[in-house]
Image (spheres, grey):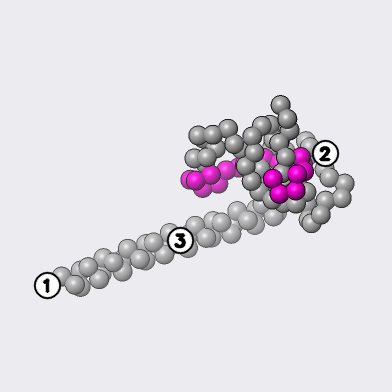
Amino acid sequence: MRAPTCTACGSSQLRRIRARGLGQRAVRTFSSLRRYACLACRHEGWARGPIPWDAGAAPRPIQAPGRPLEARDLASRRRRRLAFAASLCTAILAGSMVALVVDWAGRP
Ligand SMILES: [Zn+2]
């Protein structure tokens, strides 16, 4: 099978990453597409075929443009996503509370 390549830069230095969120997990479950991060340009996308999970297993690019993908980058991204999800939940909760109060207040 042909090695999958980055859709942004054409590099084959891809690393598989976890599908996040309901939409991405649904795509992963119902198709043969897998989520990847490009080690050369940091693009994240979908590809078919074998993509190694471990960055250490694949040969690292000698001169990669931009910073290499590092564990702490992924960790901070995960933290930001988590914070975003939390604020979204809070907003939804607050919105439904307001709706309830408005509904209650509007009753004769
Ligand atoms: Zn790339």
> Within 10 Å of the Cα at label 2, are there few (<14), some (14-19), or many (20+) other Cα atoms?
few
- Determine whether 1 is above or below 103 in the image: above
Q: Position of residue 8 (x, y in %)?
A: 71, 49
The amino acid type found where label 3 is placed reads Leu
The amino acid type found where label 1 is placed reads Pro
Q: Position of residue 18 (x, y in %)?
A: 60, 42
Distance from Cα at disc 3 to Cα at disc 1: 32 Å
Asked if the stretch drawn in magenta spans residue 52, the answer is no
Residue picked out by circle 3 = 88
Secondary structure under tag 1 reads loop
Q: Magenta residues?
A: 7-24
User: Who's the residue at 71% across and 44% down the image?
Assistant: 6
Secondary structure under tag 2 reads loop
Q: Quadrant of residue 88?
A: bottom left
Left or right position of 83 against 96: right
- Determine whether 103 is above or below 68 in the image: below
Left or right position of 61 against 28: right
Residue picked out by circle 1 = 108
Residue picked out by circle 2 = 59
Q: Position of residue 69 (x, y in %)?
A: 74, 50
